[in-house]
Every structure is written in C-alpha cells, then in structure tokens.
C-alpha cells in the first residue's frame, strides 16, 4: 500500500462522501455527510478532516470542527452541534474542543492501524493548537447482537472491561478516550436502538 494522509480538499469531497455511505449502510443518508456538506467543510476548516489515500483511492477519513462543549447541556442531536437551522457549519476557530463527527475506514483496509493514525493526527491538532480535548459521540454497532440479552448500560460496561468487542467503542477506548455517558436518539441508528456513547480525550499538555 502507498498510504498518504492529507487534509480535505474540494476534489476529495465526493469520494469521501461515497466512503461514508459504504461504511455506514444502516445510517440514514440524512445523518451522513453529503458532498455539499463536505465542500462547506473544505472551505471553512479543511485541517479538521483527515483523508487517507491508497494511491488515488480514498480509503479512510475523520471529520471534525472546533466548538465549545457543555457536557451537561448537549443539544438533542449531533446536527445542532455541527450546523445552524439554516445549514451553516458551526465551526468556531476559537472553540475549546475538537468535536470529531465521523471516522471511517473502508472494510477492505481495516485492522491495519489506519483508524489509530487518523485519531492520532486529530489529537495532534488539539495539542498543537492548545485546545482542551477531543470529543465525539460514537454509535454502538456491536449492541445490535446483544440488545435482546442485556441493557445498553451493561453492554457498554462490558465493552469497557474488554469482555465484548464493539467495532466503534472498542477502537475509541484503545485510543485513550473515556466514556462520559450514554446518549439516546443522538443519531438514528436502528440496529443499536439509536444508542451512542459520548466520549472525551483530554489534552494531556493542559
């Protein structure tokens, strides 16, 4: 593989949107980044999105913006963190936290450390710009297999203990994130009954 890690450009917006659709087939298109959304991000904050290329094929990505986070008063869905009612991106150059909205690696390229490197590059952005940390809310795709057996709270506890593997949360925990709390209906992801986990990585240099 000839992997290249770069930041978002307008030319990459369409293949990045196509990768998201491949990686999240159970998520409604309205909850996925469109090419138009990504074009707006390429204009406003291209450094916030890491794109991974194998030669000229987009095989990984991680998006995000800077914003201020009130952990006790989050809006009801992620959309209100990212956009105004008119669809304008809410990136704030002076925001205290990097909010990571999406990460995806093509199924053919998983298990090769690509997601870890995407996380590391976004953490480096937080450190280099002296921000408080990196916040995200991840769906829990692994819960689909267990939701008839246990409540989501027990599932997350067992993922944190290493007893159960979740394709999203387990990777985030390995990347030194901590679970803040569970969120209901923050995303539409019927396979896991619309549950997700709010996570945070704090800048160790502050």
Image: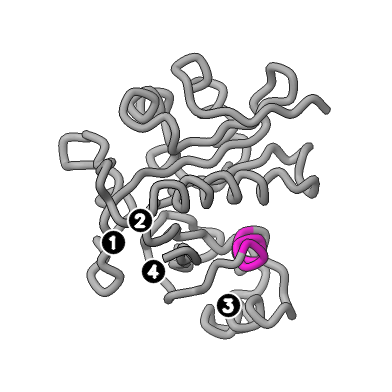
- Disc 1/disc 3 C-alpha distance (Å): 23 Å
Residue 72's x, y, as percent?
A: 26, 74
Magenta span: predominant SS is helix
Quarter where residue 41 is shown: top left
**Residue in the foreground of this view, choosing between 68 and 140:** 68
Residue 97, numbered circle:
2
**Residue in the foreground of this view, choosing between 189 and 74:** 74
Residue 69, numbered circle:
1
Q: Earlier in the sequence, mark 1 or mark 2?
A: 1
Mark 1–mark 2 contact, CB under 8 Å?
Answer: yes
Q: Earlier in the sequence, mark 2 or mark 3?
A: 2
Q: In this picture, which residue range is highlighted in magenta?
A: 168-175
Helix, strand or loop under label 1: loop
- At x 22%, y 34%, the residue is 88
Which label lies toward us, 1 or 3?
A: 1
**Residue in the foreground of this view, choosing between 20 and 190:** 20
Residue 11, numbered circle:
none
Residue 156, numbered circle:
3
Q: Is residue 195 something that shows in the picture?
A: no
């Amino acid at each position: 593989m000839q992997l290249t890690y770069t930041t978002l450009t307008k030319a990459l917006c369409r293949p990045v949107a196509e990768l998201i659709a491949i990686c999240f087939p159970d998520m409604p298109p309205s909850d996925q980044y469109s090419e138009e959304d990504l074009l707006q991000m390429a204009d406003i904050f291209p450094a916030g999105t890491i794109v991974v290329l194998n030669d000229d094929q987009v095989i990984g990505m991680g998006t995000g913006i800077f914003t201020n986070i009130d952990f006790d008063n989050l809006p009801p869905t992620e959309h209100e963190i990212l956009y105004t009612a008119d669809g304008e991106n809410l990136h704030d150059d002076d925001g205290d936290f990097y909010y990571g909205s999406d990460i995806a690696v093509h199924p053919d390229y998983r298990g090769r450390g690509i997601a870890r490197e995407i996380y590391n590059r976004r953490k480096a952005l937080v450190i280099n710009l002296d921000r408080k940390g990196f916040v995200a809310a991840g769906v829990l795709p692994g819960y689909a297999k267990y939701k008839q057996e246990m409540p989501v709270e027990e599932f997350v506890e067992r993922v944190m203990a290493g007893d159960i593997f979740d394709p999203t949360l387990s990777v985030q925990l390995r990347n030194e994130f901590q679970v803040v709390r569970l969120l209901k209906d923050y995303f539409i992801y019927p396979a896991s009954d619309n549950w997700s986990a709010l996570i945070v990585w704090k800048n160790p240099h502050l």
